[in-house]
Image (cartoon, rainbow, N blue to C red):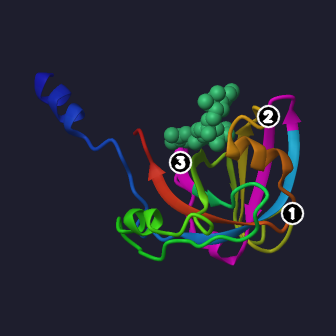
Amino acid sequence: MAERTRAARKAPKFVKPATREIVRARVLATARISPTFVRVTIGGDAVSTIGPMGFDHWFRMFFPVPGRRGFTLPSATDDRWWPEYQVIPDDERPVLRNYTFRRFRAAGAGSYGDTAEIDIDFASHGDLGPASAWANTVSAGEEIGVLDEGIGYV
Ligand SMILES: Cc1cc2nc3c(=O)[nH]c(=O)nc-3n(C[C@H](O)[C@H](O)[C@H](O)COP(=O)(O)OP(=O)(O)OC[C@H]3O[C@@H](n4cnc5c(N)ncnc54)[C@H](O)[C@@H]3O)c2cc1C
């Protein structure tokens, strides 16, 4: 029993995806699903490279500073993306926040086109933070960056 408890304690908490690369995605649709939640659906060819991992699957989202169009994304496919991000000039550096995949639809099974689709539910708190402001005003066609982080807590 003690052995099993010790083994359980040592089990890794994280499950990372097999490959990690920041990919570009597009907003396909938005919907206010309650007074305090906005659902943003993203898709695109590169989104099809992300495999659903189940409950608590999360990702890092890169998006433009509200009111500004366009941004530069890090290109490293390992942990060097972070120092690369930090040295992007202020006027090109996207905002970075973490989100949970609410729902996946595989390519061909989407609601808005042929590519894979991902729903993200944003807690909406007005203009208090850049992500909330972005989710409240974003429209279809806007580009974001996505870095799949896998599962944070097994
Ligand atoms: C692993 C992980 C997964 C996450 N998944 C989701 C997700 O699926 N959906 C989601 O909405 N968020 C999620 N978050 C939180 C998300 O990363 C941001 O912190 C959140 O969207 C707020 O970002 P912001 O830029 O709007 O505000 P920030 O700039 O972070 O905060 C500015 C101010 O806004 C206010 N504020 C921030 N959040 C809230 C809130 N929820 N309600 C009321 N006021 C608030 C506070 O006053 C805060 O000081 C997740 C975080 C982690 C670590």
Q: Is residue 92 left or right of residue 17?
A: right
Q: Position of residue 15 (x, y in %)?
A: 38, 51
Q: Which residues are magenta?
A: 33-60
Give yes or no for residue 39 being in the magenta stretch.
yes
The vertical placement of 14 against 139, above or below, is above
Disc 3 marks which residue? 57
Quadrant where the C terminus sits is top left
Q: Quadrant of residue 68?
A: bottom right
Does the beta carbon of the residue at mark 3 sit less than 8 Å from ligand 1?
no
| Residue for point 85% across, 50% down | 137
Q: Position of residue 17 (x, y in %)?
A: 43, 61
| Residue for point 69% across, 77% down | 45
| Residue for point 79% across, 34% down | 126
Q: Secondary structure at mark 3?
A: strand
Q: Nearer the viewer, mark 2 or mark 3?
A: 2
Give yes or no for residue 7 being in the magenta stretch.
no
Disc 1 marks which residue? 140
